[in-house]
Amino acid sequence: MGERRSIDPEHRAHLERSERVWNRRSDGYGRSERDFAPMLDAAVERLGVGPGDAVLEVGCGPGTNFERLHDLVGPEGRIVAVDYSHAMVERARERARENGFDNVDVIRGDATRTAFEPASFDAALASLSLSVTPDAEAALRCVREALVPGGRLVVFDLQRIQSGPLRIVNPLVVAFLQWYGNWNPDEDVRAALRATFETVEVEATYTAGTTYRAVAEKAADA
């Protein structure tokens, strides 16, 4: 595992803003965790993993999904989680220790540049993370490379309202998300998924269309 070296100033500036924002948010993430719990339950269930499997989590935050993932893969499985905020990484590591999850490895890194061992994970999860990256497609290429042939990525993320009269409030939605989480309005995560994976399906939308769940799969013969 390592990091791809090239990085431009705009990319670095976005990462640094994200770290400042999410370092501050690391102490007050509980409400978001509770609000999104049913959606996260559904996302994790769609991973299709079981005991002994390996799961990669992109943008793990304070370890919100560790219990859910551990329930599926068991102590014989493996969970590797990556996040750029050092405060979130520390909280995630603390959560893993408190639960006795010896098979959880939390890494501080840029998900758009972290290269994992090819075909080393059975599935991957990205919850509320790809839309705040400086380059969603680059992060997805790293994920796809790390998945086994036929491996699945489940995404739960934020978006503009896609249709209907409520689209009129999209400027407010974008402004709030940029303030709250350094959301990147230039990134179209759904388009990046279609550009990277062979099969992509948006399965559900929630919260007036501002959140969604998508499942992407790497070709079995890749």
Image: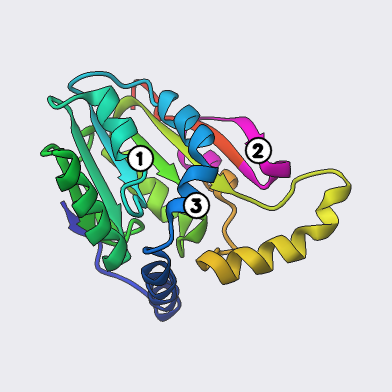
Q: State which mark lies toward you, 2 or 3.
A: 3
| Whole-percent x, y for residue 56 in the image | 28, 40
Where disc 1 sits, the SS reads loop
Tell whether label 3 touches label 2 (CB within 8 Å). no
Residue at left 33%, top 53%?
62
Residue depicted at 45% across the width and 34% down the height? 154
Dot 3 crowding, Cα within 10 Å, few <14, some 14–19, many 20+: few
Task: Estimate the spatial distance between the alpha carbons at disc 1 and disc 2, rounded to whole Å.
Answer: 19 Å
* Residue situated in front as seen by the camera: 178 or 66: 66
Alpha carbons under labels 3 and 1: distance apart: 14 Å
Task: Give the magenta-colored segment's residue range.
Answer: 193-211
Q: Dot 3: what SS? A: helix
Residue at 26 percent of width and 67 percent of height = 86
Residue 14 location in percent, x, y? 45, 73
Q: Which of marks 2 and 3 is nearer the N terminus?
A: 3
Residue 67, picture quadrant: top left
Q: Locate residue 178 relative to residue 197 in the image: left or right.
A: right
207 in the magenta segment: yes
Residue 32 pos. (x, y %): 50, 51
User: Is 141 on the left-hand or right-hand side of 78?
Assistant: right
